[in-house]
């Protein structure tokens, strides 16, 4: 079990791993919480909150540190800069923790990690911030809106600039606010579960201190509050549920599966298998899903999930979606192209995405998306459906990508998503594309388009 002292040490190590070594935050946090699952829920909640919060508010925290420290954040020793960052997060955003405790623990940790000589510096910077925290001068919104929003919401300036240009002031502010709101874990409960099994699951979650709320969009979607990790929850190993954002669940809904007909669905970028499994479930054993991904490792993630959830009608394959698989030409009733993307829609859960992104990487991703789309449309039978989706809110990867595709492949047509969507989204999906935004919709940011192949090429 970890206690207060080493709880903070653990957070420091996690931040070093994520911010200095480049590991993915959601994986680091998940692995640590799984490893220390036996620890007190309060300690686990603290570790998660401080680590995620520090990442979420990093730009604002660094801005403040640069105001109060003679040494710029970029020139500090990595251990010191991350110790200061996590301490500033606690001073500014966790009122329930006495400032004295935050500062003392930081000074102690500094010495424990062999940097006793810098403990005076750490002490001084944190004390000054604590004293002045109500009077911190932020950039003037009127004079420099981009800078103001960037620091206020800890979003890189180039992204704020891009979103203001695409979406305007009001929507951009909604998105920025939405990304900073609490993001509970959402899960898809197997629709095939009986009433008693479902009631038993809800009860055992309650006993485990987890509050499960039905999501307003879909009856089998639940949001889980008060959990620091899902793998140890009741029902996980039994395969009762899959972790999936509600936006992603809409893809299998949009597939419009006719349970009377056998069908072949092909998911060309399927790992870890969330949408493939959901489609397999909707098929109810009629027909098959072929779930492909780029590497053996990625496909092993799909296999693990299929095994846990108990689906039998999914076949997995390692395959680069840029390569053509001749035997599948015009064979699939449904092709799902849930492509690698910038992931801006899931920044609320994967808090380091915003710091990793850059325009060059976006341009590369768009080229990859075009190359994949240019191959995978061929698998769609005449009269079959191609679903294109991303978990981003970047129009170049979404609406503009669909426009590009339709121009090049005019034998596809957008088809209304409305018949497949929950009531509140029907209007927005009627043109065949649906863009969901954090802070505007009750989901992560996500894009979906339904394209019908009208004839042969
Ligand atoms: C958005 S994720 C897919 C999520 C998945 N559909 C789900 O619902 O669980 C994109 C996937 O594309 C895969 N990928 C990236 N490049 C690929 C390529 N050239 N061919 C096939 N898969 C690729 C990645 O490994 C990643 O698993």
Image (tube, rainbow, N blue to C red):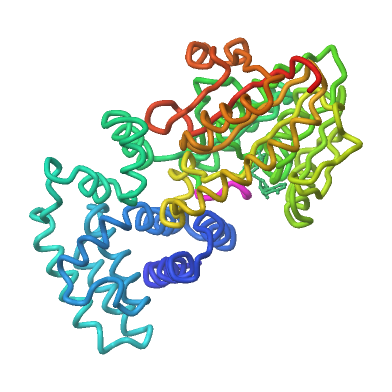
| Residue 161: percent from left, percent from top | 31, 43
Q: Is residue 399 left or right of residue 257?
A: left
| Residue 13: percent from left, percent from top | 45, 71
Highlighted range, magenta: 228-232
The C terminus sits in image quarter? top right
Q: Secondary structure of the magenta portion, mostly?
A: loop
Given residues 230 and 276, the one toward you in this image is 276
> Does residue 202 appear in this view?
no
When asked about the image quadrant of residue 455, the answer is: top right
Q: Is residue 360 left or right of residue 197?
A: left
Q: Is residue 416 above or below residue 48?
A: above
Given residues 346 and 201, the one toward you in this image is 346
Q: How many numbered marks does the figure carry?
A: 0
Q: Is residue 213 left or right of residue 114?
A: right
| Residue 238: percent from left, percent from top | 74, 41
Q: Is residue 280 above or below residue 217?
A: below
Given residues 42 and 167, the one toward you in this image is 167
Image-quarter location of ligand 1: top right
Question: What is the residue that sits farthest to the right in this orientation?
Answer: 327
The answer to whether residue 167 is magenta is no
The answer to whether residue 230 is magenta is yes
| Residue 18: percent from left, percent from top | 47, 64
Q: Is residue 191 above or below residue 173?
A: above
Given residues 240 and 376, the one toward you in this image is 376
Instruction: Please report the residue visible at 60 percent of the width from the left and 15 percent of the height from the top.
Output: 417
Q: Is residue 358 left or right of residue 147?
A: right
Instruction: Please report the residue visible at 20 percent of the width from the left and 42 percent of the height from the top.
Output: 145
Instruction: Please report the residue visible at 25 percent of the width from the left and 84 percent of the height from the top.
Output: 118
> Does residue 109 appear in this view?
yes
């Amino acid at each position: 079990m970890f206690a207060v002292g080493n709880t903070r040490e653990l957070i420091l190590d996690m931040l070093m791993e994520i911010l200095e070594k480049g590991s993915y935050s959601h994986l680091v946090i998940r692995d640590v919480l799984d490893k220390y699952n036996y620890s007190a829920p309060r300690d686990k909640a603290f570790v998660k909150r401080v680590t995620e919060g520090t990442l979420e508010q990093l730009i604002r925290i660094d801005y403040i540190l640069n105001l109060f420290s003679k040494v710029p954040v970029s020139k500090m020793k990595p251990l010191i800069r991350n110790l200061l960052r996590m301490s500033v997060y606690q001073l500014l955003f966790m009122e329930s923790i006495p400032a004295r405790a935050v500062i003392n623990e930081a000074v102690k940790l500094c010495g424990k990690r062999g940097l006793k000589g810098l403990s005076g510096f750490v002490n001084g910077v944190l004390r000054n911030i604590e004293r002045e925290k109500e009077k911190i001068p932020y950039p003037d919104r009127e004079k420099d809106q981009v800078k103001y929003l960037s620091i206020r919401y800890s979003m890189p300036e180039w992204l704020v600039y891009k979103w203001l240009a695409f979406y305007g002031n009001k929507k951009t502010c909604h998105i920025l606010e939405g990304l900073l709101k609490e993001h509970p874990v959402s899960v898809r409960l197997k629709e095939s579960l009986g009433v008693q099994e479902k009631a038993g699951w809800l009860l055992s979650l309650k006993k485990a201190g987890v509050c499960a709320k039905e999501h307003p969009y879909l009856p089998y979607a639940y949001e889980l509050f008060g959990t620091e990790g899902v793998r140890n929850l009741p029902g996980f190993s039994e395969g009762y549920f899959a972790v999936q954002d509600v936006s992603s669940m809409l893809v299998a809904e949009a597939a419009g599966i006719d349970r009377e007909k056998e069908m072949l669905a092909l998911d060309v970028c399927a790992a870890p298998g969330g949408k493939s499994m959901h489609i397999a479930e909707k098929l109810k054993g009629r027909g098959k899903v072929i779930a492909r991904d780029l590497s053996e490792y990625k496909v092993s993630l799909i296999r693990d999930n299929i095994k846990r959830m108990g689906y039998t009608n999914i076949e997995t394959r390692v395959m680069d979606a840029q390569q053509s698989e001749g035997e599948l030409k015009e064979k699939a009733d449904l092709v799902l192209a849930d492509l690698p993307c910038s992931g801006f829609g899931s920044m609320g859960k994967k808090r380091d995405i915003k710091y990793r992104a850059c325009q060059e990487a976006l341009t590369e991703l768009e080229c990859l998306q075009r190359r994949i789309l240019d191959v995978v449309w061929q698998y769609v039978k005449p009269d079959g459906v191609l679903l294109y989706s991303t978990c981003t809110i970047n129009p170049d990867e979404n609406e503009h990508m669909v426009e590009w595709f339709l121009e090049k492949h005019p034998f596809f047509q957008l088809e209304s998503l409305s018949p497949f969507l929950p009531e509140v989204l029907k209007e927005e999906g009627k043109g065949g594309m649906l863009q969901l935004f954090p802070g505007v919709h009750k989901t992560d940011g996500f894009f979906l388009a339904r394209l019908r192949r009208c004839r042969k090429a």
